[in-house]
Image (cartoon, coloured by chain):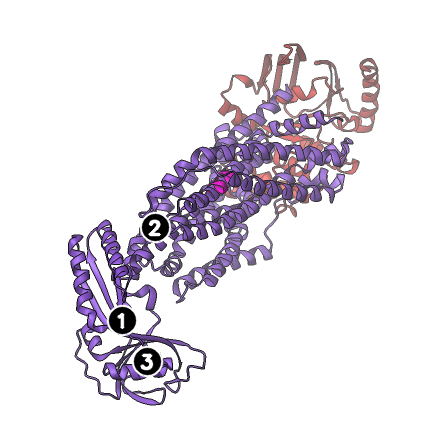
Amino acid sequence: MGLSRIIYMAWENLRQRKIHSFANIFINAISVLIFYWFLTIRTNINMEGIEGASTIDRTLKLGTLLLFIIILVFKIYVNNGILKGRYKEIGLYDAWGFTKPRIYYMLFIERLITGILSLVIGLFLGVISQGLLGQIFIRLLPFANRISNEVDPNNLLITTLSFLILDIFIYLKNVISIHSLSTITLLHAEEMGDQSSSLNWKDKLQGLLGFALLLGVYYMVQHTKSLGSLEWLLFSLVALFIASYLILYNFITLLIHGLKRSKTLYYRESLFPVIAKLGHSIRQNAKILTIICFLLTGIIIGFSTTISLYQGAERQVEDAYLMDSLLVFHDKAERNEVKDLAQSIAISQGLEVTDSLTYTLFFDSVAYDPNSKSFTSVEKASNLFINLLTNDDFNDLEKESYHLENNELLAINLPGVQKGDTLNLFGQEFIVKDSLDSFSLIEHNKASVIEDSYLVMSDLENLITIAELISEEEAVELLNYLELSTTGSQNQKAAFNQSLKAQSDDWESLSYYSHKADIRVEVFSSNSAYLLIVGTISIILITYIIFTMIYRQVKSARDNQKNIEIQRKLGMSESGTRRFVLAENSILYILPLLLALLHVAALFNLVCDFLVLFTLTDTDLIKSNLILTALIVALMYFAIYLITYLVYQKDYSRRASNCLDAAS
Amino acid sequence: MKNVLLEIQDLTKVYTQKSSKVKHPALQGINLQIEQGDYVAIMGESGSGKTTLMNILASFDFPSSGKVLMKGEELFSLAPKDLARFRREELGFVFQDFSLIDYFTIYENIAFPLVINHENKKLIKARVEEVASDLHIDQLLNKYPYELSGGEKQRTACARALIMKPSLLLADEPTGSLDSKNSKQLLQIFKASNQKGQTILMVTHSLFAASTASRVLILSDGKIIKDIQRGNESDQEFAKRLAKDIMPVEQKAG
């Protein structure tokens, strides 16, 4: 058999299974497109040199890796399903003397055709849409004006090579699978593992276990404190996945078994075949339904949290640093001069200084033993970051009127220390006049110094003595701070910061910092990148759901055709048959959505706790986004279901008419 | 005098090939009367029109011309909904491939015709248990079809066909997929139910199966060419006579 004949056969195979082929090419093209998008955004953001490019680049790098893993897992999963469905066909080729190398060659040509088509379509769409994507992305970044729209040949090459490697890997996996099976196994492969089975005690036990596990995870998520760790999140996800599978495979079957005992429901004409068939379909599709359930849960949680992060970015920045700007200078005598400078620049920019904090500070890392309440030798590993402050500055900051003697101090955020305790500071003993959990400097700078501890000393002399002991230097340098908060637009604030920065460049002993502006770039860069990654990955996951459902519906249409014909022959009316098919099919596919919505509701607290790690604490915002996303995803899923159901109906009608033609 | 259950008048069926428009007559002017309580076997070579006739009687297919009257009512004048009702109330089917629904248990397969006929649960349960017990499959009710042997599957199909107490039991090559032991058992079931008054119409290739019937029709090229009535002969004697009568037909066809 010549090469042209094998190519023709490969092409005919793709044409005959046109629904599969089209869906396969479509989903691969979407995967190529999004992979290319990630690469091109990274390149063009770096090229333009916009603020926050390194954060976006770093986040997108991780996103690209995540995307590649998702594509790999899904392609392998889908490929396994498709290959199993073709075992009989391959067995027949083998039985007809079409040798295995020729079969491998034919499969290679098929993969080559679909691979090239997917790449060409995906890259073409990528190149023509990258400008639009760039515009959308740049709108997410309030500090960037433009993004480059260059087509980098390297990105085209990397995308092509990545997908080529993926396809070669999957092709080789297929060859190994087919090679390991005998002709007779291939011919009978379809008859294996596709049977209903009676419910045994193991199924019942697993069903109850699944239900208990689900309730257990839900309970722990609701009641356990400190859930915000990544380990806990991963554990919850794995437990939820297992519970979902057991619920769908065993527990729902158990419920169906219970329904069969119901006198009123089971023996209704409209419900009898539906209940009986569901018991079978649930088991046949439990794996895929669990995956759909997880994809839906992932899309709803992923998209709503990233949109919440993005919408809450400005608040995140506000919460991280209450004060806008920070000026640091060496001479305490310059306090008023620096204050006047800031004030005049603010006025010139039309801003009003609403709050200002002035203080002198010494800070260093120290070794602290909470048991003996002593600060010991600095040669020991440091375990605490300590700040020293004077009594006067503290009283100014806090509007308090503490009066500390030389042997007294105030301890702030120092673990295990209480009022009246004696603290040993490098051999000198101090009585703790009061111990506070927090104060304004901690409150105003949540993002940077939340873990710091503070000691308030009676006066500057005392402070310097201790500072010298800590740093082991004879003359320590104390820094003076002026923190400012202003009201005005973001643009005015940007101009104010720019002027302050320019002034501080001219003033040798003055340094200017805008933590808030820096963190704003950081927060928006990372949150925009998260939104881009999760948004586009959601698109991929939705297309995967579409593909998976189309694949299952075509298979169901093929498997059910004979049974439905028997039901018709036994006197079931056409409308009754249609009602039965629709009811069974829709219940089957609504289950993962319902379970996903249940997961989302139960995981709400966990999601909120997790977002606290990103300093997002607005639960109302998260809740409204979660509800809105769930609603949109549910509607989208319903539309997808309707489309795939039409595919089912169309395929079933086609097969039925083919049968009639054959009979005629 | 027995009542006429089924009457076929000048029945023809012509298939037209879609591409070439060539016409193939499958049935040519069939006339037949089947009385209540008859046990009729239809024999003939492949392509003689047996299955086409069976499909039309079962209302799975439509005739090109002619009439099929069941209890005096013209079958093909019925609306699709009534045709479905007729099928489930008046007919029972036994097919060569058993035609059991994969995802139904044996209980569900047998109960299905009663369920779609809106019978109440008590009656359904009682009838299924009664028929299953008669056919010795009462221990298999919770199993699925793939867990059963060929004979057990065919007995299940019989139970499903008989559960509605149909006017006419149609059997299309019912022993075709069975070994001799299971074939014998099935034919005994047919005979016993016929003796209780069940009308049976069976299409078969098997002389042994046909010899259990009270009347045998030989079909060739879409026409009934012989109508053989059993007298007071035993099954063996009737089988011998059938063999003699059929031989010349087969030789002619061959």
Q: In which chain is the residue bearing label 2?
A: A
The CA distance from mark 2 to mark 1 is: 39 Å
Among the chains pictured, the one given red colouring is: B
Dot 3 crowding, Cα within 10 Å, few <14, some 14–19, many 20+: few
x%, y% of residue B100? 63, 36
Per the image, the residue denoted by label 3 is A475
A449 to B56, vertically: above or below: below
Dot 1 crowding, Cα within 10 Å, few <14, some 14–19, many 20+: some
> Under tag 1, what secondary structure?
loop
Task: Tell which circle, 3 or 1, labels the residue nearer the N-terminal end.
Answer: 1
| Residue A330: mark in rendering | 1
Residue type at mark 3 is Ala
- Magenta region includes residue A32: yes
Q: Is residue A5 visible?
A: yes
> Under tag 3, what secondary structure?
loop
Q: Colour of chain A?
A: purple
The residue depicted at 18 percent of the width and 66 percent of the height is: A337
In front of the other: label 3 or label 2? Answer: 3
- Bounds of the magenta span? A31-37
Marks 3,2: beta carbons within 8 A: no
| Residue B240: mark in rendering | none
The CA distance from mark 3 to mark 1 is: 14 Å
Check if mark 3 and mark 1 are on a common chain: yes
| Residue A310: mark in rendering | 2
Q: Is residue A484 left or right of residue A282?
A: left
A199 to A471, vertically: above or below: above
Marks 2,1: beta carbons within 8 A: no
- Magenta region includes residue B236: no
